[in-house]
Image (cartoon, rainbow, N blue to C red):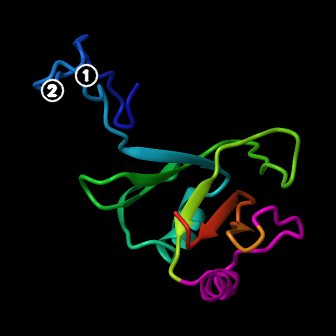
Amino acid sequence: MSLFGHVPRVAACPPRMLADDTAMSIAALTCAVVDCADPKALAAFYLQVIDAEVLFEDETYSFIGHRGQVNLAFQRVDGFAPPSWPGAAKQTHLDFRVPDIAAAEAALLAIGATKPEFQPGDETWTVLIDPAGHPFCITASW
């Protein structure tokens, strides 16, 4: 079921082909969805991190970004428990490219991120934790 309460009908189709008969992608990434307890609060944090606007928001979801681009969404999950860092269980996380890691770290800590002790990235990247407990990385390298 989609966000707006109906199930879209999707016809099966072969991948698009280039002139040399190589396959193009069959889909385009539109959004990364992050589970959390409070979507509006987490969206407010990330609105300070990236250049974005609120695209849709209700009590269950907050979508931020720009129409036609890959966006971030936050969805309420009852009983949400943040992932552990570091932890044995692997999870998806977000990486952000920044021009200056030290300056970005200071700015992110000022708006509510925290910095865990375990930092495997040396000088290449820094792991931070968002206000809902999700690890994310900042780097100037990629």
Q: Secondary structure at mark 1?
A: loop
Q: Position of residue 58 (x, y in %)?
A: 45, 53
Instruction: Establish if 101 lies above or below 30.
Output: below
User: How far apart are the alpha carbons under marks 2 and 1?
Assistant: 6 Å
Q: Position of residue 68 (x, y in %)?
A: 24, 52
Number of marks in the image? 2
**55 displayed left or right of 47:** left
Q: Which mark is residue 18?
A: 2
**127 displayed left or right of 54:** right
The residue positioned 50% from the left and 81% from the top of the image is 99
Q: Quadrant of residue 18?
A: top left
Q: Position of residue 53 (x, y in %)?
A: 35, 69
- Check if residue 106 falls in the magenta segment: yes
Q: Secondary structure at mark 2?
A: loop
The residue positioned 25% from the left and 10% from the top of the image is 12
For label 1, the residue is: 23
Instruction: Establish if 131 lies above or below 79.
Output: below
Q: Which residues are magenta?
A: 100-121
Q: Say which amino acid is labelled 1.
A: Ala
Q: Position of residue 51 (x, y in %)?
A: 39, 73
| Callout 2–callout 1 Cβ contact below 8 Å | yes
The residue positioned 14% from the left and 23% from the top of the image is 20
